[in-house]
Amino acid sequence: MASFKGTYASTIDGKRRLKLPKKLREVTPPASNDSFVMGPGYDGCIFLYPLEEWGKQEEKLRNLKVDLGEHRFLERVFVPESEDARLDRVGRLTVSQRLLDLAGIKKEVLILGVLSRIELWAPEVYKKYREQYKQSFEEVAEKIFRS
């Protein structure tokens, strides 16, 4: 099971390659064999799942009910927009222009380790996302973890 954490600033090169930080590569499950699935994430980011973790997401998608419109919509938007990616020998992934455009990523990119997945953000999009919450981190944590 992956346990990604941390925030890293990076750049996309002219060939749309992104070097994953060593700390994130080191905790990628060996069973994933340096393979990932990337696709549209929530709130304007790109989700990046190691292959092992993608299998868990795919199982959830397979359990959706095709006779429900919202389920079909989720399948039709999320799955076709997702793609396979593999780390090259120096730890880089190539990100499609389509996904970069979807997330508003030009050159600068924030890489967030979020437990089972990695998120790729345009720095200005992430800043706006953080600013939209009127509550503090502490207030949100208290609300969620209150028993």
Image (cartoon, rainbow, N blue to C red):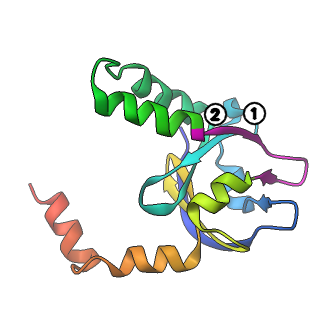
Pick out the residue farthest to the right: 89
Image coordinates for residue 73, horizontal then vertical, percent: 39, 34
Q: What residue is drawn where x is 73% and y is 51%?
A: 96
Q: Quadrant of the C terminus?
A: bottom left
Residue 59 lies in quadrant = top left
- The mark found on residue 73 in the picture is none
Which residue has dot 1 on it? 33
The residue carrying pointer 2 sits among few (fewer than 14), some (14 to 19) or many (20 or more) residues within 10 Å by Cα, namely many
86 and 32: which is toward the camera: 86
Q: Secondary structure at mark 2?
A: helix
Foreground: disc 1 or disc 2: 2
The residue carrying pointer 1 sits among few (fewer than 14), some (14 to 19) or many (20 or more) residues within 10 Å by Cα, namely few
Residue 12 lies in quadrant = bottom right
18 and 7: which is toward the camera: 18
Q: Secondary structure at mark 1?
A: loop
Amino acid type, callout 1: Asn
- The mark found on residue 51 in the picture is 2
Q: What residue span does the magenta drawing correspond to?
A: 81-94
Residue 92 lies in quadrant = bottom right
Image coordinates for residue 126, horizontal then vertical, percent: 48, 74
73 and 134: which is toward the camera: 73
Magenta stretch: residue 88 in it? yes
